[in-house]
Each structure stands twice: as C-alpha cells, then as structure tokens.
Image: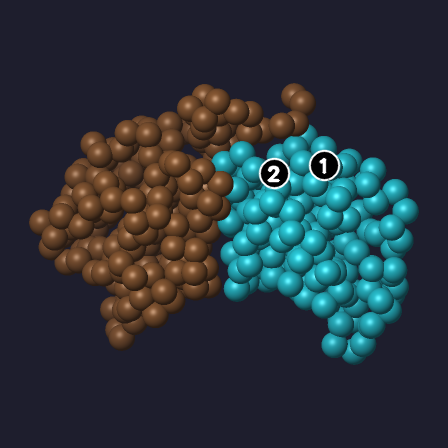
Chain colours: A brown, B cyan
C-alpha cells in the first residue's frame, strides 16, 4: 500500500469536510489530487493535528480530517492525551506511516519501524477507535467508516516509502494565499466573518 | 483581565496554567462565552488556538514565560509564517518586577523579551492593572489587523 493510492480513494469522498495536512510529500500529493477549498495544508511538522483539534472544537457541525505522518506525529505526541480526553466526534485522523525519515532522502528507519506503535499510543491516551491498517482494501473499509461516522477515529496507515511526490509540480500558491482561500471558503460556507481586522 | 478579554471578543483560550495568573481560569470557566482547552504543552496550545482562530473564534493562549520557549517553533510557523491571529497571555516570571523572582526564574525571564523580539512578535508589558481594558482591546485589534500573535506579559502587581 502506498500513500498516493490511499489519497486516490479519499479525495473523491471530500465534499464539505475540512482537510488539514502536514508537510512534505503528503502535502504535494494531496494538493495535487484534491483541489478542495477546504484544504489547509499547513506545511509544518507537528502542527496539523493541533489545528484540526482547534477547528473541530469550534466547528462541531463540520467534519474535520487530519492527514498526519509518522514523523509529524512523533514530533507532537503531546496532542494525543488532549485528543483522547476531548474525543471529538467530528474528527478523523489519518497517520501515513512509512517508517522512515523519508524527507531526508536517506530513508533512515524512524521509531515506528522499531517498537513504537502509534495506534497503541493513541489508545493508551484514550482514543478508543485507534487502529492500524496495512492493506489497501482494509484502508478503504476503515477510511470510509472514518469519513461517514460521527465518532473520533484514528487510523495509522502503514505505507511504503515512495518518491511519487517528486514527480508532481509544486504549487505556486504560497501559504498566505492558501490560508486566505481556506478562510474565505469557511466564511462563505459558515456565513460568518472570521478575519475581523479592518483591511 | 477576564472581563477585558471578553469585552475585546476573545472567546477561546487554550492554556497550560501556572501560579501567577491562574486565578483567571476558574473565572473564565464560569463564563460560558469562553471555550477553554487545557493542554499538555504550550506548543500544542498554540496549534489548537491557531485552529480555533482560523475556525472563527478569536483565540488566546495562556501560559508561563517558559511556554514561549516551548512554543517558539509553532509561534514561528503558525503564528508568523502561516499568519494566524492569537493573543498570548504570558506570566512574565523572572523579570525585574517579578515579586517571586529566584535563581530558577531569572534566567528564562531575562531572555523572554529577546525571544519575542527575534520572532518579531508585538508585545506589551503590564506592571499594574492601569489601562488594562484599553490595552487588551488594543492588543486584540492589533492581532486581527496583522493576523499574527500579539503578546501581553504580566509582571509586577500580577506576580504577588
């Protein structure tokens, strides 16, 4: 199973959900496959899950999807106790775990290639529906449930390391433009002002 | 302080409590206009506040001065680079006016303002409660105007 084929399955399921993404190849691949205005691909390690929690808290009627990686989650494990305690039903977390520091292009094994079980860590923090999938059919089954059900789900997706994202042209949109697009989409669909400062 | 935050429109507070300002937490908890989220780490508080802010609830992060050190990466990438409005309510321990200053507090206190300045985060130091309402209102207006964090540092009379 690789991340790109998982995204190919997920992208058509996106309607009015908010999708918060992390960094690296994941951002490039998701941005290429899904041009949804409700994407907020923050391009920072260790931040997507926290932002997703904040959004899910203040917009309880909107489904929030978080796309994380093993490295990004390992950098922000402090989110998991909060995630477990809040148990936000409108939040679904996907962790694409390739078990390597692939961003370095040297593919050194990360902690999850060893004894670290991220779904187990999440369960220990109170995230009841945390599990690991390794095959694409299992991914599709669990991902569909995560998208449709109103309950917190945390799905660790064991994927092969790939360089597919390097074949995709990088977006010219910078982060500020990306953020404004997301916020204006939310303002339009929520019917309220979000940025309050006078221009 | 709590009344001024409410008056200024703050309705979401993520926090890691400390000893100098922690009386604000039960006051905010009693007021249903505030959504409160306790966290394990100030970096987490900043990312959750960023999500709340981008979701339409004007947000603050309450923490001790050490939290600025812990959260500096997220202040840079989410506060400055992504550009997210949030108010930082910081107990300025280890300042010259900290009434409980000590060897432990002084060194982090000495470097707190240089860190904020290196991140180009606008800040205001409160030694007394004078003009508190106006300054909080102004700080919130500033954070909305520049769509970045603005920090309020509380020392002196706030550290008894």
Q: Nearer the viewer, residue A181 or B7?
A: B7
Discs 1, 2 touching: Cβ within 8 Å: yes
Q: Is residue A28 above or below residue B154?
A: above
Image spot of residue A109 (x, y percent)? 28, 67
Q: Nearer the viewer, residue B62 or B151?
A: B62
Q: Residue furthest bottom?
A: B103
Instruction: Tell me which numbered mark, 1 or 2, is placed earlier along the sequence.
Output: 1
| Disc 1: which residue | B8
- Chain letter of the residue beneath label 2 in the structure image: B
Image spot of residue B122 (x, y percent)? 73, 43
What residue do we see at 30% from left, 49% from top?
A151
Quadrant in which the C terminus of chain B appears:
bottom right
What residue do we see at 87% from left, 65% from top?
B96
Q: Residues within 10 Å of mark 2 (few under 14, many from 20)?
A: many
| Disc 2: which residue | B58
Q: Mark 1: which secondary structure?
A: loop
Image quadrant of residue B98?
A: bottom right
Q: Residues within 10 Å of mark 1 (few under 14, many from 20)?
A: some
- Chain letter of the residue beneath label 1 in the structure image: B
Q: Is residue B68 above or below residue B47?
A: below
Q: Are marks 1 and 2 on the same chain?
A: yes
What residue do we see at 61% from left, 49% from top?
B13
């Amino acid at each position: 199973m690789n991340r790109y084929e998982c995204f190919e399955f997920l992208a058509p399921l996106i309607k009015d959900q908010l999708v918060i993404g992390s960094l690296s190849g994941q951002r490039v691949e998701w941005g290429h496959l899904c041009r949804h205005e409700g994407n907020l691909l923050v391009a920072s390690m260790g931040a997507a899950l926290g932002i997703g929690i904040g959004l899910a808290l203040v917009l309880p009627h909107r489904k929030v999807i978080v796309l994380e990686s093993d490295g990004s989650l390992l950098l922000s494990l402090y989110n998991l106790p909060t995630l477990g305690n809040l148990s936000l039903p409108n939040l679904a977390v996907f962790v694409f775990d390739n078990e390597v520091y692939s961003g370095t292009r040297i593919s050194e094994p990360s902690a999850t290639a060893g004894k670290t079980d991220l779904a187990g860590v999440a369960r220990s923090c109170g995230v009841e529906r945390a599990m690991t999938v390794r095959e694409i059919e299992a991914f599709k089954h669990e991902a569909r449930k995560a998208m449709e059900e109103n309950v917190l789900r945390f799905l660790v997706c064991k994927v092969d390391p790939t360089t597919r994202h390097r074949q995709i042209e990088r977006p010219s949109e910078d982060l500020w433009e990306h953020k404004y697009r997301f916020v204006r989409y939310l303002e339009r669909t929520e019917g309220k002002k979000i940025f309050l400062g006078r221009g | 302080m709590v009344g001024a935050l409410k008056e200024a429109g703050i309705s979401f507070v993520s926090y890691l409590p400390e000893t100098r300002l922690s009386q604000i937490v039960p006051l905010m908890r009693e007021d249903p206009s505030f959504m409160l989220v306790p966290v394990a780490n100030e970096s987490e508080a900043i990312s959750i506040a960023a999500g709340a802010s981008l979701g339409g609830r004007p947000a603050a992060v309450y923490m001790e001065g050490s939290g600025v050190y812990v959260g500096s990466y997220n202040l840079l990438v989410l506060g400055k680079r992504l550009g997210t409005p949030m108010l930082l309510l910081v107990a300025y321990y280890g300042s010259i006016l900290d009434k409980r200053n000590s060897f432990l507090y002084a060194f982090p206190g000495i470097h707190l303002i240089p860190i904020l300045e290196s991140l180009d985060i606008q800040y205001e130091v409160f030694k007394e409660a004078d003009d508190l309402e106006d300054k909080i209102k102004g700080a919130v207006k500033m954070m909305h105007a520049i769509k970045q964090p603005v920090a309020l540092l509380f020392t002196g009379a706030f550290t008894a």
